[in-house]
Structures are given as structure tokens and as C-alpha cells.
Image (cartoon, helix red, strand yellow):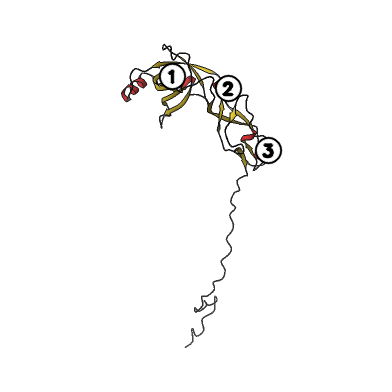
Amino acid sequence: METIELQIQVRDRVGKGATRAARRAGRLPGVLYGPKRATVSVSVDATEFAKKVDVGEGSHLIRFVSSVADISGRLALVKVMQRDPISRAVLHTDFYEVDMETKLRVPVPLHYVGHPVGVEAGGILQPIQREIEVQCLPTDIPEFLEVDVSHLGIHEAVHVSELKLPPGVEISFDKDYPLVTVLPPTVEEVAVKAPEAEAAVPVEGEAAAPAAGVKPEGEGEK
């Protein structure tokens, strides 16, 4: 996994007012914490974060550059990103400092490659999982896992047990769980012509309607 360098500053002021002021100054507020570190309020340049971190997919290993000796050179992952519900801009981020000797659980994107034979037959490729959680050391985190779907026929699937994992990467997941399948083609509804209405049958106790051109008995007699 590529390691990204990111300039980081410790925030002296906290609270909603300080957070809004940081955003107006082009800073992205956040916190840094970890298994061996108390929570520290920090900020990074919003533009630098957008260009280096908030791009692509998957997890990014970040090395901090800071004037604070205790933080500079430390490695972390983005744990949480809070976004504006409309603009989708990042408003706040949580950085989790990692121990390079301790395995982590992180989500990794799945890339489906190949053209399934079932799609050639009219089926529809249906991904069930877009990412999967793996367990590994920080330096072994894969950017993505590739899944070949070219052999899939209709109603067939690729399961977790079929994933090809890099060395040092494990999956704590149901091995029989399907990741992707090929659905049968959609059948268009064919309009069926309604049968002609059957001749009306008189209800018991009612007189039958006369046939066309036939007068009821007694009608016209004087």
C-alpha cells in the first residue's frame, strides 16, 4: 500500500466556534487517537486532504508531518469521515494511529474483472458485496482484491472461499457467502388478449333476455 504524507497541526481551540473558524481558514478539523494515544484535536489543509486522501477508494496509510515531535512521522488510517449531506464535502475526520506490529481489520474494495459467459447469454451481473473486511498488518493492506467473473454462468456465483488473497492477508468472513452472481434475463410481460365475453347466463329466478329480433311472448298481441 502506498503511504501518503500529510501536514498536520494540533488544534489549541476546540468547540463548534473553533471548528467553524478552522473550516473558514481552509482547514479540515479532526481528531487523532489510537490504542496507545489519548485523543488529540488536530487539523489538516482541506485542499491537501482532498487531493491526497479523499480520492479513489479503499484505505490509505498516512504518515504525518508536523512540528510536534510526538506526532511527526506517526502512521495512521482514516477511521471516519463526516460529510455534508448535500455537497458531500468532508467536514470532519477521525485519524486512527496504527501500530506497525499489530494486525488491523480494514475494508478493502472488490474489483470484478472479465465478461461473464452468463451475461453473453442474456444474464445480468449482480455484485452482492462491493468491499470485504480483511485482517492484516498496516503495510500489507491491499488497495483492492480482484475477482475474475468471466467463468460465471446464469445462477452461478463467486464465494468468499474463492478469493485469491495476498500473503499476510486473512478474511474473517463466512467462506460460503456469495460475492457476485449472474441473474437470469428479465422476462418482458406479454400482453394476453382477453377472451371474448361469454353469453350472459340468466340468474336463477330471472327471465332470460330475448334473442335479437324475437319479441317476448304476448308482446304485440291485443
Sequence-wise, the earlier of marks 2 and 3 is 3
Q: Disc 2 designates what residue?
A: 140
Residue 78 picture location, percent across and down = 47, 24
Residue placed most toward the observer, 185 or 163 = 163
Residue 42 picture location, percent across and down = 39, 19
Distance from Cα at disc 1 to Cα at disc 3 = 44 Å
Q: Disc 3 designates what residue?
A: 117
Name the residue at 56% across, 20% down.
Answer: 139
Residue 39 picture location, percent across and down = 40, 22
Q: Are marks 1 and 3 in contact (CB under 8 Å)?
A: no
Figure disc tally = 3
Q: Are marks 2 and 1 in contact (CB under 8 Å)?
A: no
Sequence-wise, the earlier of marks 2 and 1 is 1
Query: Are there few (<14), some (14-19), or many (20+) residues within 10 Å of tag 2?
Result: some
Q: Disc 1 designates what residue?
A: 47
Q: Quadrant of the N terminus?
A: top right
- Tell me the SS state at disc 2: helix
Q: Amino acid at mark 3?
A: Val
Q: Amino acid at mark 2?
A: Asp
- Tell me the SS state at disc 3: helix
Residue 87 picture location, percent across and down = 41, 29
Against 22, is 210 above or below?
below
* Residue 138 placement: quadrant: top right
Q: Residue furthest left?
A: 17
Q: Are marks 2 and 3 in contact (CB under 8 Å)?
A: no
Name the residue at 51% across, 17% down.
Answer: 4
Distance from Cα at disc 2 to Cα at disc 3 = 33 Å
Q: Amino acid at mark 1?
A: Thr
Query: Are there few (<14), some (14-19), or many (20+) residues within 10 Å of tag 3?
Result: some
Q: Residue furthest bottom?
A: 222
Against 165, is 180 above or below?
below
- Tell me the SS state at disc 1: helix
